[in-house]
């Protein structure tokens, strides 16, 4: 992951999509930011939260949910980092990025060419995107819809 591309200042609010083991959340926390991290797999979210608590990361908040929806109750965010690849940039994440904020997101299908994007929100309705090159990530899974 290209964490340095976020260029976050101390105290920034960062949304991470895809908590996994919690490793990326600890990297972000060590940069002096407040981390909000979402994991769709309940057991992973619980394990990561317990490990983060045990390690004393009080500025990391774990939520079990569908990362494509973001965490609107905590928005806006100064930065968003997505650690799995959706097939397109989820509109809710763009909406939750604060003006002046940056999102790093890999986009594309698994097994095909994915691109790592740096998206900057330059105004209320404007964004600038820069390709950071090819990438290979696991797919960003979504919560199943109820019938």
Image (tube, rainbow, N blue to C red):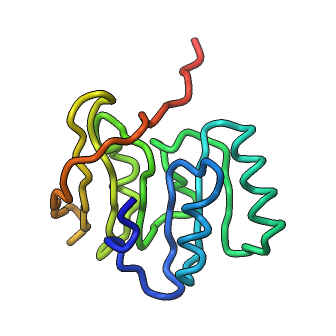
> Closest to the observer: 74 or 136?
136
At x 37%, y 40%, the residue is: 85
Q: Position of residue 62 (x, y in %)?
A: 68, 56
- Work out whether 39 lies above or below 143: below
At x 41%, y 80%, the residue is: 8
Q: Determine whether, in the image, residue 104 is placed left or right of residue 50.
A: left
Q: Answer with the quarter of the image where residue 61 lies.
A: bottom right
Q: Answer with the quarter of the image where residue 78 lies.
A: bottom left
Q: Determine whether, in the image, residue 4 is placed left or right of residue 60.
A: left
- Work out whether 74 lies above or below 136: below
Q: How many marks?
A: 0
Q: Answer with the quarter of the image where residue 74 lies.
A: bottom right
Q: Quadrant of the C terminus?
A: top right
Q: Position of residue 75 (x, y in %)?
A: 50, 64
Q: Determine whether, in the image, residue 98 is placed left or right of residue 73.
A: left
> Closest to the observer: 27 or 15?
27
Q: Position of residue 72 (x, y in %)?
A: 52, 55
At x 29%, y 27%, the residue is: 111
At x 42%, y 34%, the residue is: 139
């Amino acid at each position: 992951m290209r964490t340095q591309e976020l260029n976050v200042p101390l105290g920034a609010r960062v949304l991470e999509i895809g908590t996994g083991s919690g490793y990326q959340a600890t990297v972000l926390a060590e940069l002096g930011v407040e981390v909000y991290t979402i994991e769709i797999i309940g057991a992973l979210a619980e394990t990561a939260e317990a490990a983060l608590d045990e390690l004393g990361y009080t500025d990391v908040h774990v939520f079990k949910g569908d990362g494509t929806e973001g965490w609107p109750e905590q928005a806006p965010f100064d930065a968003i980092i997505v650690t799995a690849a959706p097939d397109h940039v989820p509109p809710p994440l763009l909406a939750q990025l604060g003006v002046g904020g940056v999102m790093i997101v890999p986009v594309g299908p698994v097994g095909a060419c994915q691109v790592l994007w740096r998206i900057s929100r330059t105004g209320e309705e404007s964004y600038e995107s820069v390709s950071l090159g090819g990438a290979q990530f696991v797919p960003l899974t979504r919560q199943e819809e109820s019938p």
